[in-house]
Amino acid sequence: MANILDVAKYFLVKVDRDAGDEITHLKLQKLCYYAQAWHLAIEGVPLCDTEFQAWVHGPVSPHLWDQYRDYKYHPIDPPKDFDPNVLTEEERSFLDEVWDVYGKYTAKYLENLTHVEEPWLEARKGYPPNVHCTRPISEETMKRYYRSLMDNGEAN
């Protein structure tokens, strides 16, 4: 099982900063969430060792949030000493696919996308839109929901 911080660093090194692209904490959280969700749907097991919670701005890994919270809404710097080979070839290939689908979207678009999907909505049930919530997003719901998108041909 991959470490969530290695998954995040993998996405951070994919950003084409020479082209003016950047990545914020919000977008990084959503990319890691979608990696976890789709891995659950496709492989039946989690990709990484983290829990995602149903925060106001969408799914958040508290462990990942702790690591990058000082950036707030500013772009995150690339990791200085990350070796992508800490991830298996299969994990890197899978993350490349997630990046190809979701990496082109803005953080706000990804946030809005999670807000209409069952896993986040289910975990937020009973909470007003702007009230803090740390309820975990069910991995079983993630697996079922994203697998249903595949089965119905609705996956990106």
Image (cartoon, rainbow, N blue to C red):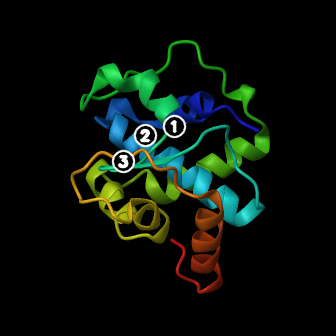
Residue 58 sits above or below residue 140 on the image: above
Rendered view: 58 above or below 91: below
How far separated are the C-alphas under marks 2 and 1? 7 Å
- Say whether disc 2 or disc 1 marks the residue closer to the N-terminus: 1
The answer for how far apart the CA atoms under marks 3 and 1 are is 26 Å
* Mark found first going from the N terminus, 3 or 1: 1
The kind of residue on which mark 3 rests is: Cys
**In the rendered view, would you say 134 is above or below 119?**
above
Q: Nearer the viewer, mark 3 or mark 1?
A: 3
Q: Residue at x 57, y 73 (%)?
A: 145
Dot 2 falls on a residue whose secondary structure is helix
Give the image location of residue 149, x and y in percent.
Answer: 57, 78
- Kindly identify which residue carries mark 1: 11
Residue at 32 percent across and 35 percent down: it is 22
Amino acid at circle 2: Leu
Figure quadrant of the N terminus: top right
Q: Which mark is residue 28?
A: 2
The residue under label 3 is 133
* Label 3: element kind: loop
Asked if the residue under mark 1 is in contact with the one under mark 2, i.e. CB atoms within 8 Å, the reply is yes
